Amino acid sequence: LSFLKGLCFLEELFITMYGNENINFSFLLNLINVRSLGIHVHKKKSIIDLVNNSNLEFFSFEYFDKNTTVNSLENCLKLKEISLSEYHLDTLENLGKLKILESLTIKSSKLRSLKGIENFINLKYLYVGGIRRLKSISAINEMQNLEEVVVDGCRQINDFELLTEIP
C-alpha cells in the first residue's frame, strides 16, 4: 500500500484487506486531503495514525484484531460521520472534541454506557448494535438535535424508557 503515499490529491479512500500479515498504514500521513476514509481490515495487527488527516469528514473502520489501533481520531475535528465496527472502544469521552459530528454508528464494542455522547452537540443519528456490555443509554437524554436512535442487539440495556423522554 506504500504506493498510496504519492497520491496526495485523493479525497476518498476505501480499503478492505484480509489475511494475517501486518499492514503499514504510514501512507496515511501523506494523504492530507482525504475527506472520506474507510478501512476494513480482518485478522491484521496495524496502527492507523490519523494525525495528518484533519480534513476527514467521514470515517468508517472495521476490524477483527484487538491489536489494531487508531490514533488521533479525536483530532479530526471536521468529522461529521463515524462508523466503528468491532473496534474495542471503551468510552466516548476521549472523542468529545468532535463537536460537529452528526452521525455515529458503533457495532460490537466494549462500551458500557454512552457517557460522553453529550459532547456531540450536533448528533442527529445514533446506531448502537451488538454491544453486549452496554447497560445504559441515559446519556442521550439531553441530546437536543438527535432525530433517530437505533438500538440493535444490546440486551443488557436497562433504561429503554428514557427514549420516550428525548426532546
Image (cartoon, grey):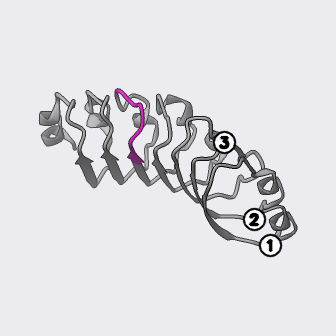
- Badge 1: few (under 14), some or many (20 or more) residues near its Cα, within 10 Å? few
Q: Which SS class for mark 1? A: loop
Q: Amino acid at mark 1?
A: Phe
In the rendered view, would you say 154 is above or below 7?
Answer: above
Q: Disc 1 designates what residue?
A: 9
Disc 3 on helix, strand or loop?
loop
Q: Amino acid at mark 2?
A: Asn
**Residue 145 visible:** no
Residue 53 in view (yes/no): yes
In the image, taking residue 112 as reference, residue 36 lies left or right, namely right
Q: Circles 1 and 2: CB distance less than 8 Å?
A: yes
The Cα atoms of the two marked residues, 2 and 3, are separated by: 25 Å
Bin the neighbour count of mark 3 within 10 Å (Cα to Cα): few under 14, some 14-19, many 20 and up: some
**Label drawn at residue 45:** 3
Q: Nearer the viewer, residue 103 or 87?
A: 87
Other residues around mark 2 within 10 Å, as few (<14) / some (14–19) / many (≥20)? some
Could you give the CA–CA distance between mark 1 and mark 2, rounded to whole angstroms? 6 Å
Name the element at disc 2. loop
Left or right relative to 9: residue 153 = left
Query: Residue at the location (65% across, 64% down)?
Result: 35
Residue range of the region highlighted in magenta in the rendering: 106-112
Mark identifier at residue 33: 2
